[in-house]
Structures are given as structure tokens and as C-alpha cells.
Image: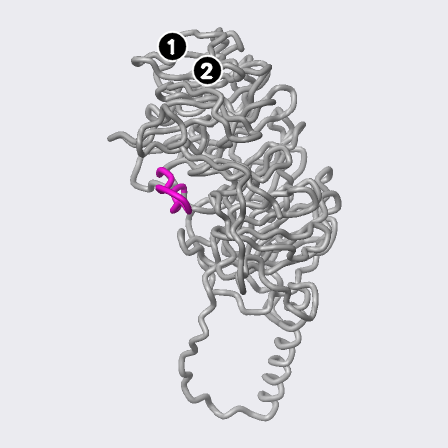
Amino acid sequence: MSEPDDARFRPGDPAPDDGIGDGYDPAPVPGFTAPQPYSVEMDDGERPQQPASTPSRHGPSAPAGPAGGHHPPAPSAPFSTARPTPARPARRSRSSWILVGAFALLIVVQLVGAAVSRLGGDEDPPPVGSTTGDVPDMAAVWLLGPEDLTEPEDGDEFARNPDGAFTGPQIIVADDAWVVAWQTESGSGWRTAGIAALDPADGGVLWERPLPGVLCADHAFDGALRCLHEDGGTWVYHQIEIATGEDTVTVETSLREVQTVHATAEGLVAVGPADPAPHAEMAGFAPDGTELWSIDVADLDSAELLFSHVYDSDGDPVLERPRWRDLDDGLVMLWATPGAAIIDPVTGPVLVHHCRAGTAQGDHYLCQDDDGLHRHALDGTITWSLPGARLTVPEDRSDARPVAITEPVTNQFEIVPVDWETGQIAGPATYRFTQQPGTWSGIVLPPSAYTLADATIVAGDAVLVALDPVTGAQLWTRPLEGDGYVFSVVQVGEVAVIDAGTHAAGLDLASGELLWTQRNTGDQLAGIDGLLVSTGYEIGVMEVP
């Protein structure tokens, strides 16, 4: 975590010449004092927002390792009200007391003004997640667990990420079916064991198919899945018809091991684990299973940037928490701390370079590094840079909407409007978050952003901030109950559904008005084709009040 000089916020001291904050005015400080600076020696632009394994609300805990879905900010620790007894001060002169009094009055005025700015009015609205009074249970249209299938064994669970990526979607969506994978636990950990197709209308099981170690790309193409599975030490390519679960193509490959896969219309990319880093297999396959290319990742320039051991400091570097993003021209991004690879599935990798908070934007992509925020063309060329800026933790999807932040004071992140074509700051900061260490990680995380059709929701510091999706102007703010932990934010109609853990709340997207609060009887909430969907240990469709 960076620890920039905070001289710009100390009366009478010159502002440091660090490039941070050029071109904009700081937002008001929230209505409380900042915590003591908390510093870590770890990249934070790509930090997950919760641990990979958290207790399930309705069944066994998810396995350690990759977990699907976007993870929102870890909760903020409560402020302590304890005060140490000060030593008796020396007698002050009258002029000293006048200065102290004036300074105290200034602080009070700032805090009151900040509180109004922070909440958007003189009265605090009820926090999201507040459960005062009777709170009804959320009703399910249908909801099922792995025990409702016939092939999984007792204790099996739905896999969080059928593609093997850290945050791949749990459900592969096709026109008339949702495909999920289940996994089983063995002495070496959890491993996928098969796939099943569900009817999204009623949860009916259309077919089940055991396939040990199966990994399937997160998109269907022409009504078919593209998958790899291990059969007696041989990795087999499958193209599977979603309507029937039957193979239309089956080809044995030369792959020795596979960690994650991704597909476009032109083909499938498979990447193996570190062997050891920076060595790893990477190969591309045509839709008919023909191998198009195969390389050792170590042969790429800067290949070491794809491997790290941030989350296992005593271990060897691995392909850590890989995520896939789709770009224009048939290209894909493989983002793995602390770098990214741009890959053509037909011809192979294009380049590897340093990249944190990798955010795809179609004909370009955004990355941050120690120098700031950069826009890259698809050939890796930097088209503009914004020193001192960074991104909120991006949502794990290819069409995530970027939100720029700066950190003028350690652990205080400001939302700043940016002209994304020119890379220029377009106005004053609109909001400041004062983050505190998460209760799970003990790490100060930046805010997280959620891309909805009608708003961008930024979550952090136990508050939600809604931004206009086009202009980036602040629409409204809303406090969060307690720790302020958010699992997900989903748009259903004109409502933003906030998954706050055991409870869900509906907010009017236009005003932020709290419409309803219910106990979440599903698992983590997601949005698919306008439906509110439970993902996690149980999968199903939930009713929206």
C-alpha cells in the first residue's frame, strides 16, 4: 500500500510534488477521523474482496481456492470510542487558546459539512441491511443443491468456476439451459467431477454427465460447450451439445495438465499450472479440436509477470488467481497477478506486460502500476497515462465500467471523474472513502465498483455511492448497516438489489430510496437475463418483491 505524504492536508505545509491530485479539488472528509495509516507490501489493485473460502449460508463451506463471482470490499472495522487519559498539559497563552479554539471550530464545521455531503441530506436514511422490525424471507421460484442431482456423491458441491479461473462465472448460460459443474473432495483437494444442464424456467435437470476434472469455457457457442477433461492421464477436448449433453467432437490432446480454459468463437485456449514458474503449457484449439499452437510460457518476454506467490509467501510462484477478459478482434486477456497476457486464440500470445486491476474495454484495456493508470491499445501500446491514479477493484466481467480513484492521504480514496478518451481528470473529486482494515484479511482495500445498466455502484467504507453510467456524476449515497459488507449488486428492472450477506435490500436506482429488505434464503446473488439468481452452494431463481 502506498504511503504518500499527507502534507496537502496539514495547514501551513506545502503540498508534496507527487503528481497526485493535479487538476481536481479534494472531496469533503467523511464525518469521522481517519484510522491510523495501515501499510502492506502487497499489490492491491487486484486484491480479492473476500477470502476464497467463506462460510456458506446454507450448507458446507465452499472449498479453499478459486471462488466465482465479484467479491466486494471487506467490512470496515468499527471505530473505537476509548480515549487514553492525557497527561496534564502545560499552561497555554491566550493567543494559543484562540488558535486552538479556531482550529477546533474549523474541524467541527468540516465534519458537519462532510456528513451532509456524505449522506446527501440533513437526516441519515436507514442503512441498507437494517433489520429493524419483522423482515420476511426472500422467496425462491426454484432452488436446488448438488444433492438434488443423481450423479454427485454425498458431500459434493457445485463448482464455483467451471472454467478453472479464479472468478469465472458459476453458471454457463445458453438459450434454453444453464450448465453447472459439480466437484468432489479428495486427498489432494477439490476437483470437478461432472457437468449438468438445468432448465432456467423451473430448475428441472435436463441431463447430467460425469467427467472427472472437467473444465469448460464460460461461454457457449452455436449451442455447444467447449471443454477439456482428464481421462486416464490424457486430456480430451470435447464439444458438447447443450440440448442433449452428447459429444459432437472428441479429440485427445498432448496436454499434460490444465489449470484454466477460455474460448472465443474462433477457438479455445488452455493454460496449465506452473511447472515450475515461469514454465507452463499454453495451447490453442480450433472448434473441431485441432491443435493450432502450443508454447512454453517461459519463452514469452516478461513471462515471470504471470506468476507470483502473494497469497502463499512461503510457496513457489504459481499462476495465481487467473482471470479472463474478452477484447475486440477476437483477442483475450489473461490477467494473473501481477501481469497480463494478450492472446490470440488462433495464433497464440501477443505480449505480456505488468498490469494490475486489468479492465477490458473492447478496443483497448486499462491497467495500473506503481506509476499510475494507463490506457493500452490492443498491441500493448500505452495511449495515455494518468500519474497517481488507480482503479476501484473492477468487477470480474469483460464489460466492467472503470471508476478512477486517487489516494491523497493513506487509506483515503477519492472518486475522480476522468475523460476516458484523453486520460484527463474532468473535474473535482466527488467522494472520499476512509477505508479501514478488513476483518478477514486485515488489509486496507480500495473501494469496489459494480456495473449496472443504469448506474455504477461503488461500495466501500460502509457506504454505497451511485454514479451516472455516462457522465460519472454522483447520483446518491446510501449508508450500509454494521460492517457494510456487500456480496454483490444486481439490477432487476429499476431496482438495485444489494446482497449484504444474510439479508438483501432493494434500492430505487434513480433515488437510492430503500424499497424493501428481506432475509436472503438463497446464496450469493447474481443477475442473469434480468433474473435474480442464487449462486454458490445452492443455485436457483429468487423472487423480487
Numbered disc 2: secondary structure: strand
Query: Horizontal and vertical percent for residue 302?
Result: 47, 27
- The crowd level at tag 2 (other Cα within 10 Å; few <14, some 14-19, many 20+) is many
**Residue 112: quadrant of the picture:** bottom right
Q: Answer whether residue 461 is visible to the viewer in this image.
A: no
Magenta highlight range: 52-64
Instruction: Give the residue drawn at x 52%, y 13%.
Output: 241
Q: Answer whether residue 62 is visible to the viewer in this image.
A: yes
Verify whether residue 13 appears in magenta: no
Q: Taken as a whole, is the magenta stretch helix, strand or loop? A: loop
Query: Horizontal and vertical percent for residue 85?
Result: 40, 83
Query: Horizontal and vertical percent for residue 333?
Result: 55, 27
Q: In this view, does 263 lie above or below 502?
A: above
Q: In this view, does 250 lie above or below 93?
A: above
Query: Horizontal and vertical percent for residue 503?
Result: 51, 53
> Camera-side residue: 200 or 385?
200
Q: In this view, does 24 lie above or below 258?
A: below
Q: Which amino acid does label 2 sit on?
A: Ala
Numbered disc 1: secondary structure: loop
> Camera-side residue: 280 or 379?
280
Q: Which residue is labeled 1 in the image?
A: 254
Q: Tell whether label 2 touches label 1 (CB within 8 Å).
A: yes
> Camera-side residue: 95 or 487?
487
Q: What residue type is labelled 1?
A: Ser
Instruction: Please give left or right for residue 289 compared with residue 389 in the image.
Output: left
Instruction: Please give left or right for residue 225 compared with residue 209 in the image.
Output: right
Q: Which residue is labeled 2 in the image?
A: 283
